[in-house]
């Protein structure tokens, strides 16, 4: 801590001494603390250890309820504890925690039998981002209808702050939806790939499965590419891409807040 | 007294009505109760929220808090400013806190004598600190920095602790009293924390309260605790906020209120959250005690 006066720094070393054992069960209790009247400190320090790890595991359990339901409570908590100890939060805002959880799951050997699990977690992380995103009125269908046909190809859109896309090689959207609604896992036919569109046009978060080419189309539009280019890229990605259907879908879902034509 | 701390700045252009919190009992606001609360003609006297839960940009949390703030006084309770830590406060977090104070004009603003961040790791717990002249100077600086950032005094809450630091040279009550003197902050007296710490450290809760600068208390917290055992098999109480207030804590509370007169009092319930009527009934029990002591002539409220 460069900004501490050296003479004071030595006397303010309590945080550096107190923290290492909080996330590392192998470490002994810090020596600068004790129980009252010479009482032992093991169970007393364990209260803090427990508060830290249990509350952070709980935070992940709240953020990833579908993931949790898929693997079961015990498996989830054991997996989350490993992640908490490896990658504790770096922000005091717990709703920001868990951004590395999906990647962690991909490398977590005991979860290897569930290759779709990480993508379900990605959808849940995006769900919480949408939940806390800034409020904004979604683009009204009339605003798009008012764009002259000859200007449509060059039209660019402003993404809604809550809009997110998660692409999966697996049937992650079907599995996510079934789990969140407490239904059994979807039938074998649902094999993916599936792309999720997450939006929150008003106060409720929606997760939809995008039609063929839809993810390419919307990702391009959200990146600020003109409508004509995005439609062409979507067609290149999927022959079955349906422009009219996708435009109607994005308006209904509230993916954008504004449309701008080059004349403006 | 700390009357000036109970009200937000008297800015000309308020989004929300100014509401009186004096002598009222309140409850933790939990989002799952929002519908029931808005349908309840007389829920409780005020609501308290954890500031950090409302530091997102938008969405349902802000819609709910705005609806609450329209009708009831709100107390903004910070849990992770890490005021008790040795390292400088997080400027981003200070800015977020300031924005929240400006947005909701809370009647009360409070934080903890504890820390939760070290270097870049956030531990999500209220961790203890040694009570020494060096930590006193550091914590006082942090309180001043926060008060300057938000433009008003805060109430600082006494912690519940499970162990002590060998290097401590000051009592907790002397430490708090010195912080009040240096920074002009007020105090949030958590009576459950007093009972938990007294049990865990083997001191008398009544003696602690006799030594507590009650004249600076702007809010009181009541909550439930859990019981474990220490290494020697003696009771070790955990500040769990997951159940009703214990009888012993109610008794201490009544003793405090008899001395201070009515002070805004919060029922905290953060885990294993019950249906709204259960929380409301706990707040009503606190309100009954407040009302009983509000009826006393003013001179009978002793000075701490």
Image (cartoon, coloured by chain):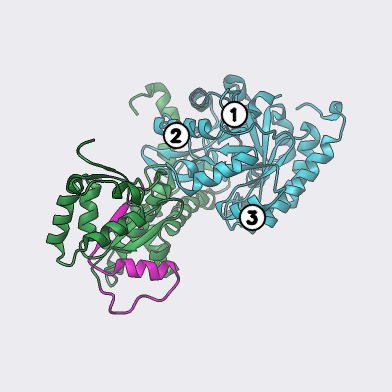
Chain colours: A green, B cyan
**Nearest-to-viewer mark from 1 and 3:** 3
Q: Does the stretch in magenta take in A174?
A: yes
Q: Does the stretch in magenta take in B54?
A: no
On screen, residue B76 versus residue B22, left or right, reads left
Part of the protein shown in magenta: A162-191
Quarter holding the C terminus of chain A is: top left
Q: Nearer the viewer, residue B208 or A202?
A: A202
- Do discs 2 and 1 share a chain? yes
- First in sequence: mark 1 or mark 3? 3
Q: Residues within 10 Å of mark 1 (few under 14, many from 20)?
A: some
**Can the viewer see residue A17?**
yes
Identify the residue under disc 3.
B36
Q: Residue B219 in the image: state x and y as whole percent.
A: 67, 35
Relative to B42, say whether B87 is above or below: above
Identify the residue under disc 2.
B96
* Element assignment for label 3: helix
């Amino acid at each position: 801590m460069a900004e501490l006066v050296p003479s004071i720094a030595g006397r303010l070393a309590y945080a550096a001494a107190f923290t290492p054992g909080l996330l590392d069960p192998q470490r002994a209790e810090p020596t600068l603390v004790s129980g009252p009247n010479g009482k032992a400190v093991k169970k007393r320090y364990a209260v803090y250890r427990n508060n830290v790890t249990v509350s952070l595991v709980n935070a992940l359990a709240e953020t990833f309820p579908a993931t949790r339901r898929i693997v079961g409570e015990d498996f989830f908590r054991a997996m989350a504890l490993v992640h908490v100890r490896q990658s504790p939060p770096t922000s005091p805002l717990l709703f920001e925690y868990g951004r590395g959880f999906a990647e962690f799951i991909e490398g977590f050997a005991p979860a290897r039998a569930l290759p779709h699990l990480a993508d379900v977690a990605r959808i849940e992380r995006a769900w919480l981002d949408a939940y806390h995103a800034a409020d904004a009125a979604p683009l009204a269908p009339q605003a798009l209808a008012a764009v002259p046909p000859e200007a449509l190809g060059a039209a660019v859109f402003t993404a809604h702050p809550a809009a997110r896309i998660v692409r999966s090689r697996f049937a992650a959207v079907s599995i996510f939806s079934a789990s969140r609604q407490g239904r059994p896992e979807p039938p074998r036919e649902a094999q993916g790939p599936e792309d999720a569109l997450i939006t929150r046009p008003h106060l409720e978060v929606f997760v939809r499965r995008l039609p063929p080419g839809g993810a390419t189309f919307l990702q391009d539009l959200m990146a600020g590419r003109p409508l004509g280019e995005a439609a062409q890229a979507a067609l290149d990605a999927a022959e079955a891409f349906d422009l009219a259907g996708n435009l109607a879908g994005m308006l209904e879902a509230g993916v954008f807040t504004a449309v701008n034509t080059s004349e403006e | 007294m700390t009357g000036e701390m109970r009200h937000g700045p008297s800015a000309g252009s308020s989004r929300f009505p100014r509401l009186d919190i004096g002598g009222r009992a309140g409850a933790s606001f939990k989002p799952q109760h929002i519908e029931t609360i808005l349908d309840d003609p007389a829920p409780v006297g005020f609501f308290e929220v954890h500031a950090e839960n409302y530091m997102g940009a938008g969405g349902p949390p802000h819609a709910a808090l705005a609806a609450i703030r329209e009708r009831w006084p709100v107390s903004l309770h910070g849990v992770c400013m890490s005021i008790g830590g040795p390292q400088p406060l997080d400027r981003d977090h200070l800015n977020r806190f300031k924005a929240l104070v400006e947005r909701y004009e809370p009647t009360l603003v409070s934080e903890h004598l504890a820390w939760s961040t070290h270097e870049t790791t956030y531990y999500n717990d209220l961790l203890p600190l040694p009570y020494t002249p060096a930590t006193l100077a550091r914590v006082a600086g942090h309180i001043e920095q926060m008060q300057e950032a938000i433009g008003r005094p805060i109430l600082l809450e006494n912690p519940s602790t499970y162990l002590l630091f060998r290097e401590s040279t000051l009592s907790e009550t002397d430490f708090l009293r010195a912080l009040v003197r240096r920074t002009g902050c007020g105090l949030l007296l958590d009576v459950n924390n007093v009972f938990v710490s007294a049990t865990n450290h083997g001191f008398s809760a009544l003696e602690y309260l006799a030594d507590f600068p009650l004249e600076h208390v702007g809010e009181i917290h009541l909550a439930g605790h859990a019981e474990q055992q220490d290494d020697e098999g003696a009771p070790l109480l955990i500040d769990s906020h997951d159940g009703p207030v214990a009888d012993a804590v109610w008794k201490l509370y009544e003793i405090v209120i008899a001395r201070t007169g009515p002070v805004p009092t919060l029922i905290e319930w953060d885990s294993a959250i019950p249906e709204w009527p259960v929380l409301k009934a706990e707040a009503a029990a606190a309100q009954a005690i407040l009302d009983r002591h509000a009826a006393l002539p003013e001179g009978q409220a002793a000075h701490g």
